[in-house]
Amino acid sequence: MKKILIANRGEIACRVIKTAAKMGIESSVVFSKDDASSLAVKMADKAFLLRDSNNKNQEYLDIDQIIGIAKRNNIEAIHPGYGFLSENATFAKAIEENNIKFIGPPHKAIEIMGDKIVSKLQAKKCGVSTIPGVDSEIVSLAEAQRIAEEIGFPIMVKASAGGGGKGMRVVHNKEDLAENFLSAKNEAKSSFGDERIFIEKFVEKPHHIEIQILGDKFGNFIHLGERDCSIQRRNQKIIEESPSPFIDSVVRDAMAGQAIKLAKSVNYFSVGTVEFIVDAQKNFYFLEMNTRLQVEHPVTELTTGVDLVEQMIRVAAGETLSLNQETISFSGCAMEARVYAEDPSREFLPSVGRLNQYFPPEEIKSDTGCIRNDTGVYEGSVISFKYDPMISKLCVWTPSRGKSLELMMNSLAEFRIDGIKNNLSFLMDVISKEKFQKGQFTTNFLSAEYPEGFRIRNLSSRDLEYLGAALLSLNKQFDLDKKSESEIFPTMRYPNLEKYNIYWRDRMIPLSWSFSDGYHRVKNQSEKEYRVNIKNLCFNQVTKIKVNSRSLNLWLRKKTDGFLVNWQGHEGELKVYPSGLSRLLELMPQKEMQVSNQTLSAPMPGLLVSLDVSVGDEVELGQRLCALEAMKMENVLYAERSGKISELNCKEGDVLSDGDKILEYE
């Protein structure tokens, strides 16, 4: 195999290119006009523009165009990545019929296992444990209501062709069924071109654990352990790890045995992942099989040392599996955190725009620790509402879970993204939670830990004093540098205490500052002293400041009266005022923001996929008004007041920008 085409974009395209280069294989990518300057296009040996013939942003789903590119350029094999056409049996079959190798499983296996209804029947047929539910398509809301009553709430409404959390809704009562049934169908049709829906019992307090398998065309199979993917938002994974802190080797082996049995029953080969739901008693139930490379595959690669993309290519080329179960060893603990362009404090609404700053932590690889950042962007890249909002996958490995947690937290703290909203602070907050640290979490973790949604992290009083001391000293150093351009800074002495007030959001702390013996000296009201040594200052990279024995790595931007600061996921504006000026500021009246509730505006860029009201309609608080599709997810907007609709400013199918007015009330 000399040439491969990657029928995908973003991070996964870059990932496949790296392995192809390592194997001496020429890599090509296809790209849309929006991705013309993408990292994948820059990295690939060749790149081919996909025409948007129907003007519907469906280029990456154009089977004929992709295969035509491969044939015209004598490309021997196509890797589908994940998402898009990766689990499309028609695509795999068309590739094979055109005498091109498909780097993935046979199309018949994709057809059976890629359909959640058919795959569940197949699992039952070969003795795999399955969740109670209905195995056939639910064609109407009336039928869904009848079946839900029979099974009993809570239930899961799922797209048959779904994946990545799309087309999936948990419904806890009959009042919420109609809306969720409709949203799931719409999202499924938009994402997969298949609106079929089925229903199954929702297992409460579940763990989402999956088994990675690998097989060749000659019936040889191995498993590569499990991944715990229980930390999810919108039914989409955000943190994964291997091994799972919940199950033991007995359960793992039983799950792996069933996974391989299922794969063999459909003559499967290549990599595949069998996902299970595991209840509190460690009973496990088949959920689905992903007939492709998983987003979270790096954690398996880090714990086993096996390059899964390389194995996919070798299997597609017809090689016999060179690995056997006895030679596979599992080492240490690996974790992956998905860094998304979204606003966790606004129910994870997608965020779009340009990456004005993009500084991931430095990648390292050693026997004691590894940091790996799989990404498809660079500083200056534009995040579009048309595609999935993932920016990168930050992965770490160490010999133990405790050390991996520490390394992940430090790596996230070093990560800097500016220009768009992102979930770095949220990821750090999740990892710092006691239950996550102890491995005591289920798929209900986020709803339990954040019942009112995620709020911006706030500093403890102790941490605020450390940060205040650091930035008061830095602010003073700017002043001292101006006064002493011709003098050597360490010889200066300012022994008299100067009083300042530090403001952080709605909090204020008084601190006193002096300078002697080359150190800034800051005291709090209890006379505790912080000795501050400014190691370096750089507004384009991490600023390092040592406070007593503690090192603070800060991302900073200078403001007129302080700094915009990001430290370990705590982000905000810290203001520094002399105490006299501070007293005067307290006397100034607060400016009141005028809020209008006469309009509904788009909270993000997106496609208006449904408009559920008309001019003259009387609406009630909480009523569904419309739905926006952004980054392949449907986001429903509800009435925040009752009233009468006086004007509609948009129509279904319109592409909206952030803040565009959708409708108005009388």
Image (cartoon, helix red, strand yellow):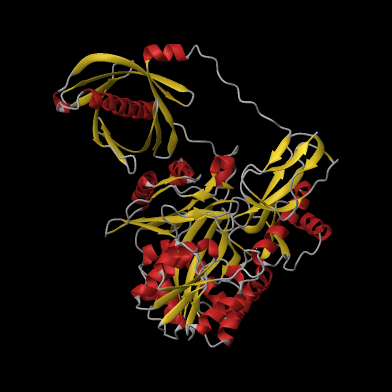
Q: Is residue 470 above or below residue 306?
A: above
Quadrant where the C terminus is found in the figure: top right
At a point 54% along the width and 68% down the height, the residue shown is 274
Q: Is residue 251 above or below residue 222?
A: above
The residue nearer to you, when weighing 353 against 462, is 353
- Left or right, residue 264 beside residue 651: left
Figure disc tally: 0
The residue nearer to you, when weighing 342 against 451, is 342
Query: In x, y percent, where is residue 150?
Result: 79, 57
Q: Is residue 61 visible?
A: yes
- Left or right, residue 13 beside residue 153: left
Q: Residue furthest front?
A: 486
- Left or right, residue 385 beside residue 422: right
At a point 57% along the width and 42% down the height, the residue shown is 448
Query: In x, y percent, where is residue 435?
Result: 48, 43
Query: In x, y percent, where is residue 201?
Result: 69, 57
For residue 450, which quarter of the picture?
top right
